[in-house]
Image (cartoon, rainbow, N blue to C red):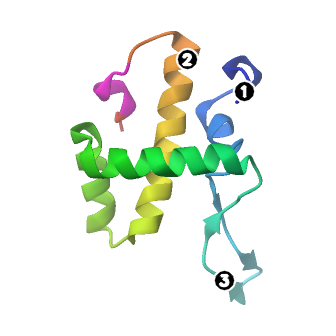
């Protein structure tokens, strides 16, 4: 990953490896399923995927975030991609501010 100084915010940082949603729309008649963009580095996505699996299943700090998505009826793969994106945004904040992980900041609404 490039330095966080090259990005203006966490959204841009999470878009770099391609873990942001890509919507399929064409006017009002075509509405396809959304998917991740996959424009970035596949190596980073693979690493994030495995990390997101572990975080989703074993990290108590992410439990509420995952349960909220499950209550909305999201499938497992969408939840994993959401966790990947959240991890990227948390990493951006930690590196940009030279700070440790803070659950209250990471999951502030």
Residue 4: x and y in percent read: 67, 21
In the rendered image, the vertical position of residue 97 relative to residue 78, given as above or below: above
Q: Name the residue under label 3.
A: 31
Mark found first going from the N terminus, 3 or 2: 3
The residue located at (47%, 42%) in the rendering is 86
Residue 98 relative to residue 72: left or right: right
Q: Which residue lies furthest to the top in this view?
A: 98
Residue 12: x and y in percent read: 68, 37
The residue located at (66%, 83%) in the rendering is 31
Q: In which quarter of the image is the C terminus?
A: top left
User: Chief secondary structure of the magenta span?
Assistant: helix
Residue 25 relative to residue 58: left or right: right
Real-space Cα separation, disc 3 to disc 1, in angstroms: 31 Å
Residue 8: x and y in percent read: 70, 26
The boundaries of the magenta stretch are 101-106
Q: Name the residue under label 1.
A: 7
The residue located at (39%, 52%) in the rendering is 53
Mark found first going from the N terminus, 2 or 1: 1
The residue located at (59%, 33%) in the rendering is 10
Proximity of marks 3 and 2: CB atoms separated by less than 8 Å: no
Proximity of marks 2 and 1: CB atoms separated by less than 8 Å: no
User: Which element type, helix, strand or loop, lies under badge 1?
Assistant: loop
- Give neighbour class at mark 1: few <14, some 14-19, many 20+ (Cα, 10 Å): some
In the rendered image, the vertical position of residue 17 relative to residue 9, given as above or below: below
């Amino acid at each position: 990953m490039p330095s966080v100084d090259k990005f203006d915010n966490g959204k841009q940082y999470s878009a770099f490896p391609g873990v942001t949603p890509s919507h399929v729309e064409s006017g009002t008649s075509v509405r396809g399923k959304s998917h991740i963009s996959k424009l970035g580095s596949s190596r980073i996505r693979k690493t994030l995927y495995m990390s997101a699996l572990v975080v989703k299943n074993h990290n108590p700090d992410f439990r509420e975030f995952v349960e909220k998505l499950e209550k909305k009826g999201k499938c497992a793969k969408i939840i994993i991609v959401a966790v990947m994106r959240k991890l990227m945004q948390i990493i951006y904040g930690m590196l940009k501010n030279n700070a440790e992980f803070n659950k209250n900041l990471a999951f502030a609404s």
